[in-house]
Image: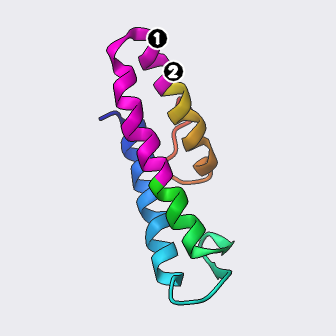
Amino acid sequence: MSDLTEFLLARIDEDEAEAREGQPEEGTVYGALGFFEPSRVLAECAAKRAIISGLDDALDTYAGMRAMDRVLEHMASVYKDHPDYREDW
Protein backbone atom coordinates (compact mmCIF):
# COMPACT_ATOMS: atom_id res chain seq x y z
CA MET A 1 0.00 0.00 0.00
CA SER A 2 1.44 3.38 -0.97
CA ASP A 3 1.89 6.35 1.35
CA LEU A 4 -0.78 8.15 -0.66
CA THR A 5 -3.27 5.31 -0.19
CA GLU A 6 -2.49 5.13 3.53
CA PHE A 7 -2.94 8.90 3.85
CA LEU A 8 -6.24 8.81 2.00
CA LEU A 9 -7.64 5.87 3.99
CA ALA A 10 -6.65 7.60 7.25
CA ARG A 11 -8.54 10.75 6.22
CA ILE A 12 -11.56 8.66 5.25
CA ASP A 13 -11.40 6.99 8.69
CA GLU A 14 -11.35 10.42 10.34
CA ASP A 15 -14.32 11.64 8.28
CA GLU A 16 -16.22 8.47 9.13
CA ALA A 17 -15.50 8.85 12.86
CA GLU A 18 -16.74 12.45 12.78
CA ALA A 19 -19.90 11.39 10.95
CA ARG A 20 -20.58 8.57 13.41
CA GLU A 21 -20.26 11.05 16.30
CA GLY A 22 -22.91 13.20 14.65
CA GLN A 23 -25.11 10.31 13.57
CA PRO A 24 -27.58 10.37 16.49
CA GLU A 25 -28.64 13.82 15.32
CA GLU A 26 -31.27 14.04 12.62
CA GLY A 27 -30.36 15.94 9.47
CA THR A 28 -27.48 18.35 9.20
CA VAL A 29 -25.01 18.69 12.08
CA TYR A 30 -21.88 20.73 12.67
CA GLY A 31 -18.48 19.24 13.45
CA ALA A 32 -14.88 19.19 12.25
CA LEU A 33 -16.26 18.64 8.75
CA GLY A 34 -18.31 21.85 9.01
CA PHE A 35 -22.04 21.44 8.43
CA PHE A 36 -22.74 17.94 7.13
CA GLU A 37 -25.31 15.18 7.02
CA PRO A 38 -23.82 12.10 8.73
CA SER A 39 -25.58 9.55 6.52
CA ARG A 40 -24.22 11.21 3.37
CA VAL A 41 -20.68 11.35 4.77
CA LEU A 42 -20.85 7.66 5.76
CA ALA A 43 -22.05 6.75 2.26
CA GLU A 44 -19.26 8.85 0.75
CA CYS A 45 -16.65 7.12 2.93
CA ALA A 46 -17.91 3.71 1.82
CA ALA A 47 -17.83 4.81 -1.83
CA LYS A 48 -14.27 6.13 -1.53
CA ARG A 49 -13.10 2.86 0.03
CA ALA A 50 -14.80 0.91 -2.78
CA ILE A 51 -13.07 3.08 -5.38
CA ILE A 52 -9.67 2.53 -3.77
CA SER A 53 -10.30 -1.21 -3.52
CA GLY A 54 -11.47 -1.39 -7.13
CA LEU A 55 -8.41 0.45 -8.35
CA ASP A 56 -6.26 -2.44 -7.17
CA ASP A 57 -7.38 -4.28 -10.31
CA ALA A 58 -5.77 -1.56 -12.41
CA LEU A 59 -2.33 -2.38 -11.03
CA ASP A 60 -1.84 -5.11 -13.64
CA THR A 61 -0.38 -2.63 -16.14
CA TYR A 62 1.86 0.42 -15.97
CA ALA A 63 -0.91 2.55 -17.50
CA GLY A 64 -3.29 1.20 -14.89
CA MET A 65 -0.86 2.10 -12.12
CA ARG A 66 -0.58 5.69 -13.39
CA ALA A 67 -4.35 5.96 -13.70
CA MET A 68 -4.75 4.73 -10.14
CA ASP A 69 -2.20 7.25 -8.89
CA ARG A 70 -4.01 10.10 -10.62
CA VAL A 71 -7.39 9.12 -9.16
CA LEU A 72 -5.90 8.86 -5.66
CA GLU A 73 -4.09 12.18 -6.08
CA HIS A 74 -7.39 13.86 -6.96
CA MET A 75 -9.17 12.21 -4.04
CA ALA A 76 -6.39 13.26 -1.64
CA SER A 77 -6.32 16.85 -2.89
CA VAL A 78 -9.44 17.70 -0.87
CA TYR A 79 -7.31 17.17 2.25
CA LYS A 80 -4.52 19.53 1.10
CA ASP A 81 -4.77 21.55 4.33
CA HIS A 82 -4.08 18.47 6.49
CA PRO A 83 -0.57 18.52 8.04
CA ASP A 84 0.24 15.05 6.65
CA TYR A 85 -0.62 16.02 3.06
CA ARG A 86 2.38 16.01 0.73
CA GLU A 87 2.55 18.38 -2.24
CA ASP A 88 4.48 15.77 -4.27
CA TRP A 89 1.36 13.63 -4.53
Mark sitting on residue 67: 2
- Residue 33 against residue 54 in the figure, above or below: below
Q: Which residues are magenta?
A: 47-68
Give the image location of residue 58, x and y in percent.
39, 22
What percent of the width, then of the height, locates residue 72? 50, 35
Report x, y in % for residue 50.
Answer: 42, 45
What crowding class fits label 2: few (fewer than 14 Cα within 10 Å), some (14-19), or many (20 or more)? Answer: some
Callout 2: SS: helix
Q: Is residue 66 left or right of residue 6?
A: right
Res 78 label: none
Identity of the amino acid at label 2? Ala
Quarter of the N terminus within the rendering: top left
Residue position for label 1: 63
In the rendered view, tell whether residue 41 sits above or below residue 81: below
Q: Is residue 84 visible?
A: no
**Numbered disc total:** 2
Residue at 61%, 88% in the rendered image: 26
**Tag 1: amino acid:** Ala
Please report contact status of discs 1 and 2: CB closer than 8 Å, yes or no.
Answer: yes
- Which image quadrant for residue 37? bottom right
Most frequent secondary structure within the magenta stretch: helix
